Image (cartoon, grey):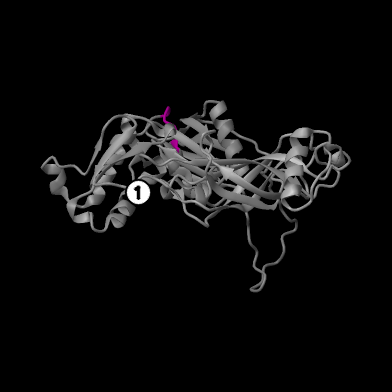
Amino acid sequence: MIRREQLARGCAQILLMCAMLTECAAPASAQTVQDFARLSGQGRSVLQGVGLVVGLNKTGDDGKELAMARPLAAMLQNQGVPIGKMSDLEKGKSVALVQVMCRLPETGALTNDTYDVSVSTLGSCSSLRGGRLYLTALRGPFKNDPEIYAFAEGQIELDDPTITTSGRVRTGAQLVTDIKMEPVGDEFELVVEPHFVGWGTTAAIAEAINAESGDPSQVREGRRIAVAVDDRSVRVMVPQSERVQRANFMRDVLKAPVNTNAMPATVVVNQRNGAIILTGNVTIGPVAITHKSLVITSTTPAPTPTQDNPLVLRDRWARAEIPITNPADSLRLSDLTAAFKQLDISVSDQIEILQMLHKTGSLKARIVID
């Protein structure tokens, strides 16, 4: 439950029976340049291929499906097992034709790097459980790109036991060709991620980089290292003194802390890694929430505490007192972070609570679920 009460002295007391942020998702640890922008020229690459999953227990494609039978026959022939007629493959249901996808990081990848691949059925296969991806060549996403960038193979794991027609192979893809992004020159641009587009964002990023440079004269004389070009990009000039150790300069730029108060109030939730990033002054209006994960347990009578077995009280709530000068004021979500850290709610429940707050209009921010 989240409850807001006004006291006679003009204070607000919040009794928190749920948590929206954990230590790993605290906004203070996520507000750096690299959380809001990427280098121009960098972008996530996608490799793809069509392969076969073998070892299925009578859940594979029907042997009469030529889309599966032909590549299976070719695979067997390459292994020295010639197939006389396609009808020879009709009785088996241990193989499935699948689409294989591999997403590479924005910074690129090098030969022998390994990454997860996702696998999805293309035919009548009812389950990939227990199957193994046969060695599959992965190419670029365009039809006119014949180059092989990686090979994938390995045991398939189901991400969701109830969805048996798709899964993944952990570190199943191994690159055989480098995929490099454009090198950083003496001048480069940072591109703001779509969730955070706005003049306030680019201005805040430019200010953060200029402050991190540690040379006030660069700003006074009009030679700013970083300048907001528009609402989506920031141009950065590498100082002459930093060009020898360019890597150190890039590290400092990307790690520069950003003041998000001028940004549009936004909550970005990444469901894959459980990260929650706040920008601007995200506030919460008066609201009460009952949630499935909130349980209070008590023992009566209470046990007698000893030195070896002390009596430990565990409360699923925390209290934060914040001065309120105007009864219409809302509470800043960032002010409650210290109280949220005391609670132990799963990431999925945190996301659900945030969505509930947004749906009721109590979360005074735009919410983006990745």
Residue 41 visible? The answer is: yes
Residue 226 image position (x, y, % from top left): 24, 41
Disc 1: which residue: 254
Chain part drawn in magenta:
327-332
**Depth order, front residue of 44/140:** 140
Residue 321 visible? The answer is: no
In the picture as drawn, the residue positioned furthest to the right comes out as 91
Horizontal placement of 100 versus 240: left or right? right
Picture mark count: 1
Q: Residue at (70%, 50%) from the top-left corner?
A: 134
Q: Quadrant of residue 125?
A: top right
**Depth order, front residue of 13/250:** 250
Please identify the quadrant where the N terminus is shown: top right
Does residue 241 sit above or below 144 in this rendering?
below
Q: Residue at (43%, 32%) from the top-left corner?
A: 194
As shown in the figure, which amino acid type bears the numbered disc 1? Leu
Residue 331 located within the stretch drawn in magenta: yes
Horizontal placement of 370 versus 206: left or right? right
Does residue 124 sit above or below 250 in this rendering?
above
Horizontal placement of 62 versus 29: left or right? right
Horizontal placement of 133 versus 102: left or right? right
Residue 363 image position (x, y, % from top left): 50, 31
